[in-house]
Image (cartoon, rainbow, N blue to C red):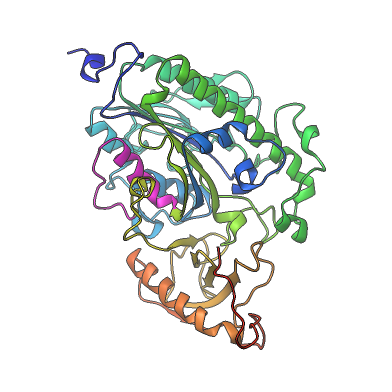
Amino acid sequence: MHRAARWGYDGGMSACVERPNVIVFFTDQQRWDTTGVHGNPLDLTPNFDRMAGAGTHVARSFTCQPVCGPARACLQTGMYGTQTGCFRNGIPLPDDVTTLAQCFNEADYRTGYIGKWHLGDPKVWGPVPMERRGGYQDWLASNTLEFTSHPYETCLYDNDGEAVKLPGYRVDALTDAAIRYVDGHQHDPFFLTVSYIEPHFQNDVDDYPPPDGYRERYDGRWVPPDLSALGGSTHQHLGGYWGMVKRLDEALGRLLNALKSMRLRERTVVLFTTDHGCHFKTRNSEYKRSCHEASIRLPTVLCGPGFDGGGRVNELVSLIDLPPTLLDAAGLAAPDQMAGRSILPLVRGDRDGRPDDVFVQISEAQVGWAVRTARWKYGVDAPDGDAIEDAGSDRYVEQYLYDLQSDPHELRNLAGAASCREIADELKARLLRRMEAAGEAAATIEEAPAWAGGQLRPPDGAVLNDPL
């Protein structure tokens, strides 16, 4: 039987697809507030915003690891860094874990990967041997794209490990390759990941290089409140960063238009998300490795079968939830190893049994963990831990406590505040449960030094509105 007939495809005029195509549009280091739906006033993301309005906007989405390699391992496997062993950059994806690509392969999908991988041999920047590709059948990627390319010099490696140089600005080069891939697989069910390096900084020059002419559009314009308050490298880099985000959104529009022109739009699930955010050297000496919203909150939206018309999902969702979500959308069972939960029940209005917090591991800058609820953020640090060598510790100390209702930009650390001791103890218990479930060894958390102050208390008899 012809593949198209098997899928009930009649040339695109109408069809109900049992298992849709799936595309992951994956950016790198993109803050959640780069998007219009999250209040950015610069009109950087009209395509993302339109997709959020027509599809499903995951409004409170968070990474489980604010650093490239570990976050990517979580997305490919649905497992935490303590479970895969990929707790920092430079640790290859293990051979004995089931990946998304393998799940789709077993379901007779064609699987393709384009762009940045960052899960191969750390000593090899470019080619990735077949056994290290996570099961993807079709390959046009670089292990560390930031080291094998520049904004107008894109070099990827094909199935045979041969270098392929692509023309144009790097975002456009990868998008062109993605559209060619989709065009070549119109009658196959396919799972495609397009993994951009933008808006990540270019390592060798420590800059955020946008397309020519784009930096000038955005220099000196809107600054998010946390960056405005804390400084860092914000004013040096933000114009270029905004320009990179703008070009990514234009690429998203091109890909969605291509799907529409091929009459694939209604039978293709598209996920837009990123690995982590960016704090522009405001929270430590680099750009991301912290528990703050700038580092961990993500722009996430889905469209296509199961997600069109889904509206806004307000529950807390982790990157770890997205792999089982994609499998669920394709009618496939998630492997038992996956730690997250599909959000499709949320889209359908079923909110029973979901966790009401998200869990984050921080590595490389520190050995740390954090838990975030709708209102509170609680983070711990291992003072004796080696941030490169140690995945965990048996001893932690409270480092951060933020009331996100009264302090959404995390400018007042309440760790140790006597008036917040009760909530800190509750969050400590939550975090220890989460750490144990993720494979962390038994540990203790010491209280931060106590100090007077903290939460303002209402007068006796006053009634406060419930938090949003």
Q: Quadrant of residue 42?
A: top right
Give residue 22's quadrant in the image: top left
89 to the left or right of 36: left
Residue 390 seen: yes
Q: Nearer the viewer, residue 403 or 89?
A: 403
Looking at the picture, does residue 439 appear above or below residue 40? Answer: below
Foreground of the two, 143 or 59:
59
The residue drawn where x is 51% and y is 26% is 156
User: Which residue is at the front of the view, 87 or 265?
Assistant: 265
Q: Which of 132 and 32 lies nearest the eye of the viewer?
A: 32
Instruction: Answer whether residue 329 is magenta in the image.
Output: yes
Instruction: Point out residue 75 in the picture as x, y percentages from the top left corner.
Output: 41, 45
Q: Is residue 403 on the magenta stretch? A: no
What is the x, y in percent for residue 407?
65, 67
Q: Which residues are magenta?
A: 318-339
Which quadrant does the C terminus fall into? bottom right
Is residue 201 shown left or right of residue 309?
right
Q: In the rendered view, does 181 fall on the left or right side of 95?
A: right
- Residue 363: horizontal and vertical position, in percent? 51, 60
Relative image position of residue 226 (x, y in whole percent): 71, 58
- Quadrant of the rendering where the N terminus is positioned: top left
